[in-house]
C-alpha cells in the first residue's frame, strides 16, 4: 500500500519522519525560483529585471558619491583647484528629458538611461587601471573605483535585457558618447593630472545619479503603468 503525497510516493508503512521530510522536499521544490542556478536560458520577468537594476544603480550612485567626496577631501581642498576643472562631461551631448512628460516617454527614458551606461565603460576601465597603478591613491578610493566599474558592467547587462523586453529589435550600435580624457589622467604634471581625476569623479557622480533617476522613472512607467 502506498499514498501519493506531493510530488513522490510515500509508503504507508514508512516512518512518520519520512513523510515529514517528503513534504518539506516538495515544498522546497515548489518554492525554488525559476532562475535558480543561473541557467543560461533563464528569462527573468521585467519587474525582476527592473528591481535588480534599480538596486544596482542606486548602489553605484552612492559609491560614486563617496568616491567623489573622498577625492575632494583628499586633493581638492582649494577653490583654485576646483576652478581649473573642465565644466563639462563627455556625456553632456546626450539629450535628457526636458520635463515630466518627456521623462515618462518610454523611448526617451530608454535613451537617457542606455547611453550614459554604455558611455562610461571605457572611462571606467582606464580610471580603474590608472588609480590601481598610482601609489598616491588611498586603498578605499581604489576599491570604490573597482566596485563601480564591476557593477556598471553588471548594470549594462541588465539594461540590455530590459531593452530587449521593452523595445525588441533595438540595435545598440554607436550609442555611446566618446571619451577623450585619458591624456589628462596620464599628464606628467601632478596638479593637471588631479584636475583630470576631479573632473572624471565629478561627472561620474552626476551621471550615476541621472541613470538611477531615469531607471526609477522607467520602472514606474513600464512596470507600474505610471501609478507610483
Image (cartoon, rainbow, N blue to C red):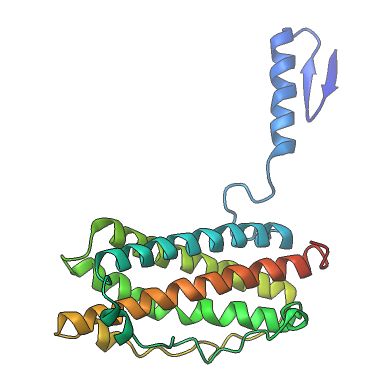
Task: Please tell me which residue is depicted at 63% across the width and 86% down the height of the picture.
Answer: 171
Which residue is found at the position 82% from the left and 23% from the top?
Answer: 5
Q: Residue at x 78, y 81 (%)?
A: 101
Q: Is residue 88 above or below residue 204?
A: below
Query: Which image quarter: residue 127?
Result: bottom left
x, y percent for residue 208: 51, 71
Question: Does residue 90 appear to the left or right of 142 in the view shown?
Answer: right
Farthest residue in the front direction?
79
User: In which quarter of the view is residue 224 placed?
Assistant: bottom right
- Left or right of 82? Residue 60 is right
Q: Give the camera-side residue of 11 and 213.
A: 213
Please indicate, yes or no, whether residue 19 appears anywhere in the rendered image: yes
Instruction: Check the picture and name the quadrant holding the C terminus.
Output: bottom right
| 70 lies left or right of 162 | left
Rendered view: 96 above or below 197: below
Residue toward you, 8 or 74:
74
- Image quarter of the N terminus: top right
Inspect this view and state whether residue 161 appears.
no
Task: Indicate the position of residue 120 as horizontal and vertical percent values.
Answer: 45, 78
Residue 41 x, y percent position in the rendering: 64, 61
Residue situated in front as seen by the camera: 196 or 27: 196
Q: Position of residue 62 (x, y in %)?
A: 48, 60
Residue depicted at 16% across the width and 79% down the height: 190
Counting every numbered tag in the picture gives 0
Amino acid at each position: 500500500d502506498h499514498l501519493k503525497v506531493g510530488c513522490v510516493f510515500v509508503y504507508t508503512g514508512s516512518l512518520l519522519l519520512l513523510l515529514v521530510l517528503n513534504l518539506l522536499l516538495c515544498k522546497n521544490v515548489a518554492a525554488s525560483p525559476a532562475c535558480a542556478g543561473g541557467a543560461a536560458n533563464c528569462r527573468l520577468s521585467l519587474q525582476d529585471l527592473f528591481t535588480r537594476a534599480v538596486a544596482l544603480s542606486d548602489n553605484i550612485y552612492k559609491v560614486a558619491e563617496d568616491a567623489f567626496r573622498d577625492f575632494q577631501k583628499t586633493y581638492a581642498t582649494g577653490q583654485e583647484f576646483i576652478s581649473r576643472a573642465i565644466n563639462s562631461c563627455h556625456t553632456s551631448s546626450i539629450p535628457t528629458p526636458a520635463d515630466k512628460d518627456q521623462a515618462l516617454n518610454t523611448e526617451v527614458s530608454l535613451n537617457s538611461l542606455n547611453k550614459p551606461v554604455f558611455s562610461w565603460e571605457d572611462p571606467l576601465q582606464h580610471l580603474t587601471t590608472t588609480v590601481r597603478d598610482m601609489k598616491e591613491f588611498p586603498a578605499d578610493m581604489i576599491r570604490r573605483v573597482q566596485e563601480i566599474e564591476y557593477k556598471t558592467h553588471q548594470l549594462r547587462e541588465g539594461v540590455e535585457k530590459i531593452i530587449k523586453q521593452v523595445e525588441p529589435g533595438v540595435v545598440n550600435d554607436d550609442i555611446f558618447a566618446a571619451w577623450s580624457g585619458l591624456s589628462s589622467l596620464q599628464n606628467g604634471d601632478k596638479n593637471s593630472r588631479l584636475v583630470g581625476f576631479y573632473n572624471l569623479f565629478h561627472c561620474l557622480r552626476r551621471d550615476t545619479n541621472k541613470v538611477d533617476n531615469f531607471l526609477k522613472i522607467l520602472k514606474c512607467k513600464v512596470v507600474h503603468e505610471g501609478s507610483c
